Image (spheres, rainbow, N blue to C red):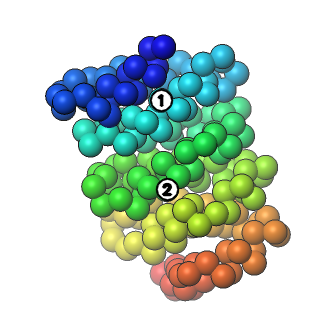
């Protein structure tokens, strides 16, 4: 279908301009799709694929907007590749700070859903939260604050506390943040 085609073109076309335009078209369509529509899973798959493009694209912005919508949060957190995609954007130095902020805000919004907290307590998400929470400097402030909120929310799930306590760097970054 159209969503799959746009995703593939946004990642694999030889022309960077074509990649960028395909990603833009995909994201424009995405603004009108929510979890209760028939093509939502296809959209999430397409966004995961498009996020792998080397061309600059607004995928992180769309994922943030999708995560802001309460009714999308449950299905987003469980969709294969979404949490890893958001975490990868946060950790990859090739992404712009604005993309990292959008990805971290999406993770923060997803952690607001109580039923998502246990599923989100995995290495890739925790790595992103720890890395972003520990960043300092004015340009990182919003990203760091969003990561801290995500850590706090996930820690409210009792079954997450042991995993989080053992995750490398998490307790150190929490201590560091409390000293700011």
Tell me the mark number nearer the camera, choosing from 1 and 2.
Answer: 1
The residue closer to the viewer here, 36 or 138, is 36
Numbered label attached to residue 7: none
Is residue 59 visible in this depiction of the protein?
Answer: no
Mark 1 → mark 2, Cα distance in angstroms: 17 Å
Question: At 44% across and 47% down in the image, what residue appears?
Answer: 102
- Compared to 127, does 20 lie above or below? above
Question: At 69% across and 37% down in the image, what residue appears?
Answer: 75
- Dot placed on the residue nearer the N-terminal end, 1 or 2: 1
Label 1, residues with CA under 10 Å away: few <14, some 14-19, many ≥20: many
The residue closer to the viewer here, 81 or 58, is 81
- Compared to 62, does 82 lie above or below? below
The residue closer to the viewer here, 50 or 37, is 50
Which residue occupies the extreme top position in the image?
Answer: 1
Is residue 67 visible in this depiction of the protein?
Answer: yes
Question: At 31% across and 52% down in the image, what residue appears?
Answer: 95
Question: Residue 140: x percent and y percent?
Answer: 37, 64
| In this picture, residue 42 sits left or right of residue 71 | left
Question: Residue 103: x percent and y percent?
Answer: 47, 49
User: Badge 2 is on which residue?
Assistant: 87
| In this picture, residue 36 sits left or right of residue 50 | right
Question: Residue 6: x percent and y percent?
Answer: 38, 21
| In this picture, residue 179 sits left or right of residue 89 | right
| In this picture, residue 33 sits left or right of residue 114 | left
Q: Secondary structure at mark 1?
A: helix
Q: Secondary structure at mark 2?
A: helix
Numbered label attached to residue 46: 1
- Compared to 131, does 87 lie above or below? above
Question: Residue 122: x percent and y percent?
Answer: 64, 63
């Amino acid at each position: 279908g159209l969503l799959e085609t746009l995703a593939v073109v946004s990642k694999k076309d030889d022309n960077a301009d074509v990649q960028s335009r395909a990603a833009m078209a995909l994201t424009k369509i995405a603004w009108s799709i929510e979890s209760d529509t028939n093509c939502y899973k296809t959209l999430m798959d397409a966004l995961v694929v498009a996020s792998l493009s080397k061309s600059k694209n607004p995928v992180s912005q769309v994922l943030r907007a999708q995560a802001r919508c309460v009714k999308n949060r449950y299905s987003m957190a469980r969709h294969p590749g979404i949490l890893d995609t958001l975490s990868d954007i946060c950790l990859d130095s090739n992404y712009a700070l604005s993309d990292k902020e959008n990805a971290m805000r999406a993770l923060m919004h997803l952690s607001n859903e109580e039923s998502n907290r246990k599923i989100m307590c995995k290495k890739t998400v925790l790595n992103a939260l720890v890395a972003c929470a520990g960043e300092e400097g004015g340009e990182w402030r919003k990203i760091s604050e969003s990561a801290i909120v995500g850590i706090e929310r996930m820690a409210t799930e009792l079954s997450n506390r042991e995993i989080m306590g053992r995750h490398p760097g998490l307790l150190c970054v929490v201590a560091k943040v409390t000293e700011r």
